[in-house]
Image (cartoon, rainbow, N blue to C red):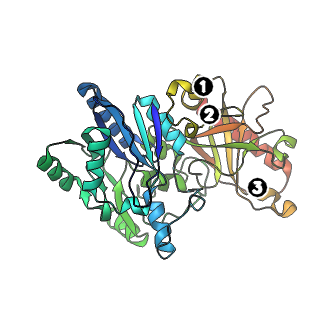
Amino acid sequence: MRISRLTPDESGIVPWPTLSVSKKAVVTVGVFDGMHRGHTALLERVKTLAEQQRAYSVVVMFDPRPGVVHHFVKQHQGLEPTAEDLAVDSQALMSVDERAHRMAQLGIDHLLIVSYSMAFAAKSYRFFLGQLVGKIGMRTLVLGSDAEMGSNRAGDIDAIQRLAEATGVFQLDVVEDVGPGYTRVPRTIVPQAPKEAGEPDDPLTHLNKDEQRSWSKSHDAAKVRVWSSTNVRFLLSQGRMVEANEVLGHNHVIEGKVVHGEQRGRDLGFPTANLGDPVGGYIPVDGVYAGWLIDLGEHGKDFGELVGEDTAAISQANVDARISPGSPWRWPAAISIGTKETYEEETGLQQRVVEAYAMSDHWLDLYDHDVRVEFTNFLRPQFKYDTSEELVAQLKKDEHSALTLLQG
């Protein structure tokens, strides 16, 4: 897969690359945050049509996420954010690099990452699609049935279909609703840690229709697809990891660099890999989780360095470590997210940290390494223990619980 990062000029014009003077393109457009099952279905359709048409499969992906840019502008009286303002997107489910890796695994030929700006957003969908036709040779556009694009989001599926029929220069292929339908999610997602051990249930499961409507009203809930980034974000904020992973079609993942912590885990016999800031991907609600720790090495190859390069340039070990369950640099882990309540009074520290205890027979020196943390199950809430001995006893239980789930 070849990757191009494209920055619109001050007037919003994108410097689209010439992919080929003769070969055409099947294109899809979006953010693809989380790369959930709906995204995968869309990308597989792009790949299938491209093979049938002997065309390139092309993904146009926006970064930063449009919603983040528009929210910033609204909150700052029309002032457009700088790259520094948007350096950390704590609500993004997945890093751009991780999205790119998964697209490469699906066999996409070209990924065009467009830096989303308000000048670009002001362009009409007609202008945008005209650029895709004229500049990169788009002959088929693949979209989900609820897609919208262009200034004021005027380019919905009906409008785009009319444009395709009127011009005759491209075809629109609509991937109809996939997944198990719709659910309701609060418009404002507030993380809420489960109060009991074990995978939390859907709170609506045991409510009748009247009670569900009451819950929806009290939480100002909106109707969203089950297979959606919004739903995944909500599930992760409630510790409902199994449900989130079911929507994603893969384990939820975050990435970061291992830094030196208080080394308290080592003193207790449970040395952990502490992730420093920034962390790539959405950090689930506080608690202890079962999952996996994957070592990407001291200089994990960043897709951002691969502009114009071929996927073959990436270390195969790095790709395998990110994606393959059989990677030799992958260990079962108990993952803790929280503020270390047991030692707060002693240390005075209340910083929220992510630390993973890798269950290995050998000491792992991962300092300054890039690592990937995958989540599979919620184990328990964070508790404050009276003594270190009580905490160690609980950590042993966590280790056993995590191994039982991961090896079962």
Q: Is residue 77 above or below residue 202?
A: below
The quadrant in which the C terminus is found is top right
Tell me which numbered mark, 1 or 2, is placed earlier along the sequence. 2
Q: How far across and how far down the image is residue 383, in percent?
A: 72, 56
Q: Amino acid at mark 2?
A: Lys
Tell me which numbered mark, 2 or 3, is placed earlier along the sequence. 2
User: Left of 336 or right of it: where is 177?
Assistant: left
Q: How far across and how far down the image is residue 403, in percent?
A: 65, 32
User: Left of 207 or right of it: where is 360?
Assistant: right
Rounded to the nearest angstrom, the CA distance separating label 3 from label 1 is 36 Å
Q: Is residue 317 above or below residue 79?
A: above
Q: Is residue 361 above or below residue 41?
A: above
Q: How far across and how far down the image is residue 399, in percent?
A: 71, 37
Q: Nearer the viewer, residue 316 or 182?
A: 316
Q: Secondary structure at mark 3?
A: loop
Q: Which mark is residue 301?
A: 2
Q: Which mark is residue 340?
A: 3
Residue under the point 47% across and 67% down? 71
Residue under the point 32% across and 53% down? 182
